Amino acid sequence: MLNSIEILKSFEQALIGFEDNPEWQSKMSTAEVKNPWFTQDSITNNLDSWRTALRDENVNKWLNNHDINVPQSDKVLGIIGAGNIPLVIMHDVLVGLISGLKLKIKLSSDDEELPKYWIQKAQEIRGINFEIEYVERLNDIDIAFATGSNNTHRYFEYYFKNKPNVLRKNRNSLAVLGMHNNYTESKYHQLGNDIFSYFGLGCRNVTHIKVPTGFDFKPMIQTWEKHFLELANHNKYVNNYNYHKALLLMNLDPHIDSGFVLMKESESLYSPVGVIYYSFYDDVQQVNDFINSNKEDIQCVVSDLREINNKIEIGSAQCPQLWDYADGVDTLSFLRKELNLI
């Protein structure tokens, strides 16, 4: 029998003191060389978030309705990971391991170093041997988890059509604000974390802000300039900013330019790196209607307005807990039902 808590504890212990561990620091540096979006700050923030999520109280809350002792299964879970932010594949990996499955993992070329090292270190700490194989193609699997773009999603649907599966495509996140005089610099700073963490590349990053008609953007932008201006020093980010700035200027599109991020009025949920879209509303019900009609494309909604449905707190978008499942699909219950464990 496998003990889910022991497995998760091994991953938590593997993160102890990572900030001062030469091996961790070496892997982090290598990861940044291979993928310049994975800066040391981004990786550190991600690992710290994982360390918090794996605390005993959070693990116990997550597993509260599940048996922590599960038999080792002969079935194989195939996982295709994304590479937009560090270690984004790891939730699927942990869910598979604590469900007793063997794993075949297709890592993104943008995020290979860190998952492999964390898994290896977790095995060494408690002498647990996870049955994991890293592959380039998912053959001979029983269940599939795959995350990719809208284009690759169509391929996934065809390739895994005869397997139980959880398939994910592009999603973005939305912020809904009230009138500007309700917000402090601290709250705008927290909203900035929801937008700019990981350079806005995660599905939980806010890419669109809905504000009431008459909203004054100036205090918000001034706060962002104070706390996030260093983004302009990152080569890949500033290249995106400059490219989209040039397009807006050539097309004579009205926009707000802070010097490191562009803001443009648009109803689109997705905005490219270096750009934030915004739109106005007159009635909160309009916003809830928008959310409902676009729910398949929205990962999470950030807001402090009590009228907004299914919202999370401002500043929490990139601090997910173990029970914050991507696309709202409870993968732990999904697997355990497939294995007749619940």
Image (tube, rainbow, N blue to C red):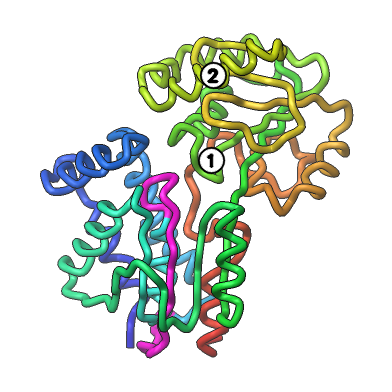
Identify the residue position indicated by label 1 in the image: 316
**Badge 2 density bin: few <14, some 14–19, many ≥20, Cα 10 Å:** many
Locate residue 124: give its quadrant.
Answer: bottom left
Q: In which quarter of the image is the N terminus?
A: bottom left
The chief SS type of the magenta part is: loop
Of residue 44 and residue 270, the one placed in the foreground of this image is 270
Dot 2 or dot 1, earlier in sequence:
2
Report x, y in % for residue 9.
29, 65
Between residues 281 and 9, which one lies in front from this camera angle? 281
Q: Which residue is drawn at 35% across and 67% down?
A: 136
Q: In this view, does 179 lie above or below 297?
A: above
Foreground label between 2 and 1: 2
79 magenta-colored: yes
- The picture places residue 272, in percent across and down from the top left corner, at 57, 31
Q: Residue type at mark 1: give it.
A: Ser
Q: Which residue is at the far left? A: 22
